[in-house]
Image (cartoon, helix red, strand yellow):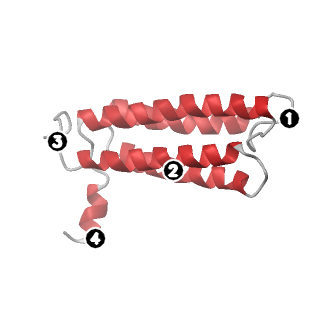
Amino acid sequence: MATGERIWQFFTPLSRAWNRVLFLTWALFAVAMGFLAATSQRTGKRLWWVDAHGMHLFFTIALIYFSAVVVMGLAIKQSRFAMAVAVLCGIAHIVSASFDLSGITGSATAAFILAISTLAASLACSAGIGQRPGTTAQ
């Protein structure tokens, strides 16, 4: 299989079962980020997008949760772009978490591990690529 053919196959829809796995992965990511933000504020080891007064920066939180909602929406819709968007958002969250790793915050390590885990789970959903949408993996 040629490289161009492999990249093109990356934009094929996932099977219904793998779309559900992708949806669940990003739903759990959103929940975990909420718990991590609350914990980081309570412990005083804040993430870069949580300020000192417990008031969250609306724009950055909107971007963090918006990415999860977009991936979940594409997975429900069984869009051919769901996998590509999930990988791009996963990489963006890894980059976001790496900003905190340069500081002294302990919550950044958890955010970094959570982002890597979400990206790995999203990449695992590539097992559903190449199957007809609506079929389950054999």
Are circles 1 and 3 on residues that touch, CB within 8 Å?
no
Local crowd size for mark 4, using a 10 Å CA cut-off: few (<14), some (14–19), many (≥20): few
Residue at mark 4: 3
Point 28% across, 68% down: residue: 4
Q: Position of residue 124 (x, y in %)?
A: 34, 48
Query: Measured along the vertical axis of the image, is residue 14 above or below residue 9?
Result: above
The residue at which mark 3 appears reads as 132
Residue type at the position of mark 2: Ile
Q: Secondary structure at mark 3?
A: loop
Q: Nearer the viewer, mark 1 or mark 4?
A: 1
**C-alpha distance separating marks 4 and 2:** 25 Å
Q: Residue at x 26, y 63 (%)?
A: 6
Label number found at residue 52: 1
Tag 4 or tag 3, which sits nearer the N-term? 4
Q: Quadrant of the N terminus?
A: bottom left
Q: Residue at x 73, y 35 (%)?
A: 40
**Dot 1 amino acid type:** Ala
Lower position in the chain sequence, tag 1 or tag 3: 1
Q: Earlier in the sequence, mark 3 or mark 2?
A: 2
Q: Give the mark nearest the N terminus, 1 or 4.
A: 4
- SS for callout 2: helix
Q: Count up the numbered dots.
A: 4
Q: CA distance from mark 3 to mark 4?
A: 21 Å
Per the model, the C-alpha gap separating discs 1 and 3 is 49 Å
- 93 lies left or right of 87: right
Chain-order first, disc 2 or disc 1: 1
